[in-house]
Amino acid sequence: MNRREFLRTGAGATAVAAAATASTAGTASAQAAEVTVGPGGDFVFEPAEVYVKPGDTVKWVWDSDRHNIQVLNQPDGESWEGTEGDKSKTYDTGHEYEFTFETKGTYEYQCFPHAPSMAGKVVVNDSGEAPSSGGGGKEADPEHMGVPIQAHFVGIATILAIFVSLMFTFFLLKYGESPHASGGD
């Protein structure tokens, strides 16, 4: 292998390791979903539709004033009541509310003062994800496949691989190739 081939190979390996680190860092997911109430003063919930698994907690965070959560529809046996107080009681910026959803099904809610445009939905299913439309979808998370990958381990391995590649390149450039390494004439 000559120097150019080595440098191309080293650069390619470094790029692959960096891409693996970037994609793994993005796979860490929180146990609870978060919904912004009235982002920027708009009369919406963002996101309007949330998918979670049974036992997951959804947290609503107020970004503007005079909003509440009034439950419109929920599966039989569930006891979600929305924010405390009657439907005219509202909360202001900075308020937080959360609820843990145990029963599978669809939960519909609205902000009473700003209904019907300010409405949202929580869907509780086995996967905690929106049904796939058959056109691709999310990248598989290795932890769900039984591979215990930690982002910091991948980062450390990437840094180590880059360091080893740089050291090998340094010695190769400083001391040159062995006359027997190229295999050519």
Image (tube, rainbow, N blue to C red):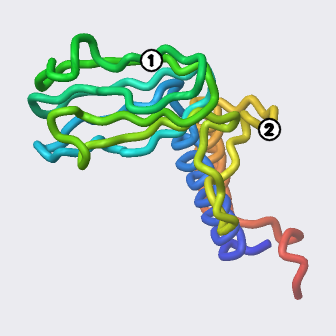
Q: Do the residues labelled 2 and 1 touch (CB within 8 Å)?
A: no
Left of 41 or right of it: where is 105?
A: right
Q: In which quarter of the image is residue 129?
A: top right
- Above or below 97: residue 129: below
Residue underneath mark 1:
80
Q: Which residue lies furthest to the top in this view?
A: 85
Residue 44 in view, yes or no: yes
Q: Which mark is residue 145?
A: 2
The residue type indicated by label 1 comes to Trp
Task: Point out the image quarter for the N terminus.
Answer: bottom right
- Rounded to the nearest angstrom, the CA distance separating label 2 from label 1 is 33 Å
Q: Nearer the viewer, residue 77 or 17?
A: 77
- Above-or-below relation of 138 to 68: below
Give x and y (percent) for residue 9: 70, 67
Is 63 situated left or right of 4 in this image?
Answer: left
Question: Which residue is the extreme one toward the bottom?
Answer: 185
What residue do we see at 17% from left, 29% from top?
A: 67
Mark 2, secondary structure of its residue: helix
Q: Which mark is residue 22?
A: none
Q: In the image shown, does 76 or 173 lie closer to the viewer?
A: 76
